[in-house]
Every structure is written in structure tokens, then in C-alpha cells.
């Protein structure tokens, strides 16, 4: 197989910074080379892992097969009318660069999703979301290749069965498709979502009274930079657990014992802030050897260096158990473990 790196170091390729290796690594730059690569690994029966920016994975050890990082670049306009633009980006485009490309062109829809690490190709996998916006709100379709059969298929938003940090690519079709391009319907007259978290406050601080998408992206960047650890300095995979959704009855019961419970009503129940639950169990700022719970946000687990995915997963289990014992609520891990 051409263009393969043997015994590749994955430490710079996962934001937790775990020191693991892959038997082979390849970075195909176009769909044809990706398909050829998939055909040859199927013939050799090698395990395959698709990797983007490595910001939502935990490596529990070396990977015994081929890691493929789609390096398919390019952003192109597919169609345009007086209200919107349909834009397609390659899977290997850096997500934040794509967001900034859109807002710098005055297009709205992605501004609340600024500064999320990773690639365009990985963004639909967990329906990335932040500040009340999810990729499903703006995604028109995506193109993916079946890893085994080589079939190329276009998925509409509804084909992807998007949910809260979920899609078929994380559930029933997990590790079956390689996303090669994603298209987005961006608006020339956007309705901005400013009522989530501190966005409005941040815009006021910046003296911005009639915000454009670029101003909102800048506000989100400022909030996130102040709150979240930068993986270049402290290994992390963002929020380590999803916010659990409980029934109305369970919420009422919990509220009696914990009147300060942080919760948000949803159509399917009540969403609890997992970070708050973890903090109540005393984990914020706690360290277990080379890993720990971030001091400013208990939902983020961090790696100080020299540790392993195994240690981090042990801490994650301890946290899940403590939250279950105290509140009777299961919290599910967000990153995928390999
Ligand atoms: P990776 O971690 O490389 O991969 C994630 C999963 O997607 C893996 O299962 C992988 O096999 C699969 N995958 C990757 N590329 C492809 C492809 N082309 N085709 C098919 N499958 C693929 N997430 C949010 O939703 N909202 C946030 O606000 C947010 N903030 C974060 C902040 C920080 C500091 C960090 C470290 C993470 C944050 N995340 C957030 C999580 C993460 O950035 C997103 O899930 C991101 O989309 C992952 O992209 P990636 O390219 O790094 O994917
Ligand atoms: P935050 O603003 O401190 O809020 C804490 C939690 O409350 C969040 O998890 C958020 O849920 C929820 N919340 C806040 N305002 C809400 C509202 N108006 N309606 C419903 N739910 C509300 O959170 P943060 O940690 O600083 O993160 C800010 C945003 O970035 C959040 O949307 C978060 O999901 C996203 N983020 C995600 C990751 C990741 O790795 N997945 C990492 C960092 C930040 P939601 O999480 O459901 O939005």
C-alpha cells in the first residue's frame, strides 16, 4: 500500500495527548485514494480506524491496524440564491476554519459552533453542538463511503438520525462509513441565537449592539477561551460526559433533595447539567496521578502528561459511580474509546 507510515506516533493526533502508536497511518488527500486504500485494507483484513482531529477519542492502547485520516480539503459553493448559500466542505477541512470562512463571508448558521476542535468530516458523527445550535440545524447532506463495500452514498439530515450528541454514525452504523464531504445551507439573513450561556453578555461587553455572525463567533471564541483548557497546553477531549435527560417525575424528586439542581426542560424530559452533578460529588480540581477533573469545569477530564487512557477511563468510572450513588442518574461518556 502506498503512502503508509509504519509504527506511527498518535500522540500529536489525539487532543488528550496519550502516547500510543498505530501499526500504519495514511492520510489520503482525495476520495479516489481513500477508496483505493479501503479496498486494499479489506483485502488484507486489517482493522481500520478513521481519525479526524482526535478531539473526541480516548486511546486505551496502541492501534493494531491502519489509522486513516481523510485529508480531503476544499470549500466550494454549490448553489446560491438571494437568501442562502449551499456550501460543501471536504472532510479534512478544520472545523473552526470552516466556521470562520462562513462568518467572514457574512453567512450565518455556524457562528455558535466556533472554536470546536476537529474536522468537518467528524462533525456530523456526534451532531456537534454548542450554545443552543447543532450541526443538524444547518447541514443539508453529507457524502460517505462504505468502508467494506466501497458504496458511495449521500445522506440527508434525516438519514443521519441526529440526536443530542448522536447520529447513526455513532450508533447503529458506527465505524461503517467514512464521511468525505458535508454540505451546509447557510443564511444571508440569519436569525442569530444569542440567548444561550453568556453570548449576549459577551456582546455587550464588546459594545456590540447589532451583531453580525462574525461578532457572535468572536463572542463564543472569547467565552470558550476563558473557560476551556486548550489541548495544546493541557490534554483533554472537551466535555467527557453527556448531560443526562431524566423524566419530569425523577427531576421533581431530585429537586426536593437538591434544590440547587441545574436543569433545563426539554421536549423529552429534563436535561441535567452533568458538570454540576460531578462537581457536587467533589471531583472538580481532583487529580488521580497523571489525570484529573479540570479545576474550572468538572465536565472536562484532563491529562497532565505521562498517563494512559486506562487511567482516564478508571477515573471516568469512579465519577459515573459517584454520580449514580448520590443522584441515581447514569451519565454516559461522550468520546469514543479505541
Ligand atoms: P475525532 O476525535 O478524530 O473522531 C471522533 C469520532 O468520529 C471517531 O469515532 C472517529 O472514528 C469518527 N470520525 C472522524 N472523522 C470521520 C470521518 N471523516 N468519517 C467518519 N467518521 C469519522 N463537541 C461538541 O459537540 N461541542 C463542543 O462544543 C465541543 N467542544 C470541545 C472542546 C474541546 C476543548 C475539545 C477537546 C473537544 C470538544 N468537542 C466538542 C468534542 C470534539 O471536538 C467534536 O466531537 C469534534 O467533532 C470531533 O472532531 P475530530 O475531527 O477531532 O474527531
Ligand atoms: P455552560 O454555558 O456553563 O452551561 C452548562 C450546561 O448547561 C451546558 O452543558 C448546557 O447544555 C446547559 N445550558 C446552558 N444554558 C442552557 C440553555 N439556555 N438551555 C439549555 N441548556 C443550557 O456550558 P459550557 O461548559 O461553558 O459549554 C458551553 C457550550 O459549549 C455548551 O453548549 C456545551 O455543550 C458546549 N461545549 C461542548 C463540549 C463538548 O466536548 N461536547 C465542550 C465544551 C463546550 P448543553 O451542553 O446541552 O448545551
Image (spheres, helix red, strand yellow):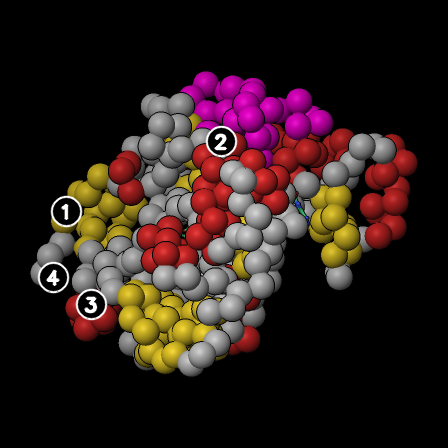
Q: CA distance from mark 3 to mark 2?
A: 37 Å
Which of the two discs, 2 and 4, sits closer to the camera?
Answer: 2
The answer to whether the residues at label 3 and label 2 have Cβ atoms under 8 Å apart is no
Find the magenta span and give its range.
279-302
Query: Which residue occupies the foreground of this view, 173 or 140?
Result: 140
Identify residue for label 1.
6
Identify residue for label 3.
30
- Asked if ligand 1 lies within 8 A of label 4, the reply is no
Identify residue for label 4.
1
Q: CA distance from mark 1 to mark 2?
A: 39 Å
Residue 333 in sight here: no
Identify residue for label 2.
226
The answer to whether the residues at label 3 and label 1 have Cβ atoms under 8 Å apart is no
Say which label, 2 or 4, has the lower sequence index. 4
Seen in the image, is 9 located left or right of residue 282? left
Indicate the secondary structure of the residue bearing disc 1: strand
Say which label, 3 or 1, has the lower sequence index. 1
Residue at 76% over, 31% down: 326
Indicate the secondary structure of the residue bearing disc 2: helix
Amino acid at each position: 500500500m502506498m503512502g503508509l507510515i509504519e509504527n506511527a506516533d498518535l500522540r500529536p493526533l489525539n487532543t488528550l495527548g496519550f502516547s500510543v502508536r498505530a501499526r500504519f497511518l495514511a492520510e489520503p488527500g482525495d476520495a479516489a485514494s481513500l477508496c483505493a486504500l479501503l479496498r486494499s485494507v479489506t483485502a488484507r483484513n486489517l482493522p481500520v480506524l478513521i481519525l479526524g482531529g482526535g478531539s473526541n477519542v480516548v486511546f486505551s492502547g496502541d492501534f493494531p491496524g491502519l489509522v486513516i485520516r481523510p485529508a480531503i480539503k476544499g470549500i466550494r459553493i454549490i448553489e446560491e440564491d438571494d437568501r442562502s448559500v449551499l456550501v460543501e466542505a471536504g472532510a479534512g477541512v478544520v472545523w473552526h476554519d470552516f466556521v470562520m470562512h462562513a462568518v467572514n463571508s457574512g453567512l450565518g448558521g455556524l457562528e455558535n459552533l466556533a472554536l470546536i476542535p476537529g474536522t468537518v468530516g467528524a462533525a456530523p458523527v456526534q451532531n456537534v453542538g454548542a450554545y443552543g445550535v447543532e450541526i443538524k440545524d444547518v447541514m443539508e447532506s453529507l457524502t460517505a463511503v462504505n468502508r467494506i463495500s466501497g458504496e458511495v452514498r449521500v445522506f440527508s439530515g434525516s438519514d443521519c438520525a441526529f440526536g443530542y450528541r448522536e447520529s447513526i454514525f455513532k450508533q447503529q452504523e458506527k465505524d461503517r462509513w467514512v464521511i468525505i464531504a458535508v454540505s451546509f445551507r447557510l443564511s444571508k439573513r440569519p436569525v442569530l441565537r444569542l440567548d444561550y450561556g453568556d453570548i449576549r453578555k459577551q456582546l455587550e461587553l464588546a459594545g456590540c449592539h447589532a451583531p453580525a455572525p462574525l461578532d457572535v463567533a468572536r463572542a463564543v471564541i472569547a467565552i470558550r477561551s476563558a473557560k476551556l483548557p486548550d489541548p495544546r497546553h493541557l490534554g483533554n477531549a472537551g466535555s467527557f460526559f453527556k448531560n443526562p435527560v431524566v423524566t419530569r417525575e425523577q427531576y421533581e424528586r431530585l429537586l426536593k433533595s437538591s434544590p440547587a439542581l441545574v436543569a433545563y426542560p426539554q421536549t423529552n424530559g429534563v436535561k441535567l447539567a452533568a458538570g454540576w452533578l460531578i462537581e457536587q460529588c467533589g471531583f472538580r480540581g481532583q487529580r488521580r496521578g497523571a489525570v484529573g477533573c479540570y479545576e474550572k469545569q468538572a465536565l472536562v477530564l484532563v491529562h497532565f502528561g505521562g498517563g494512559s487512557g486506562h487511567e482516564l477511563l478508571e477515573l471516568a468510572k469512579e465519577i459515573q459511580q459517584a454520580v449514580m450513588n448520590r443522584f441515581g442518574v447514569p451519565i454516559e461518556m461522550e468520546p469514543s474509546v479505541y
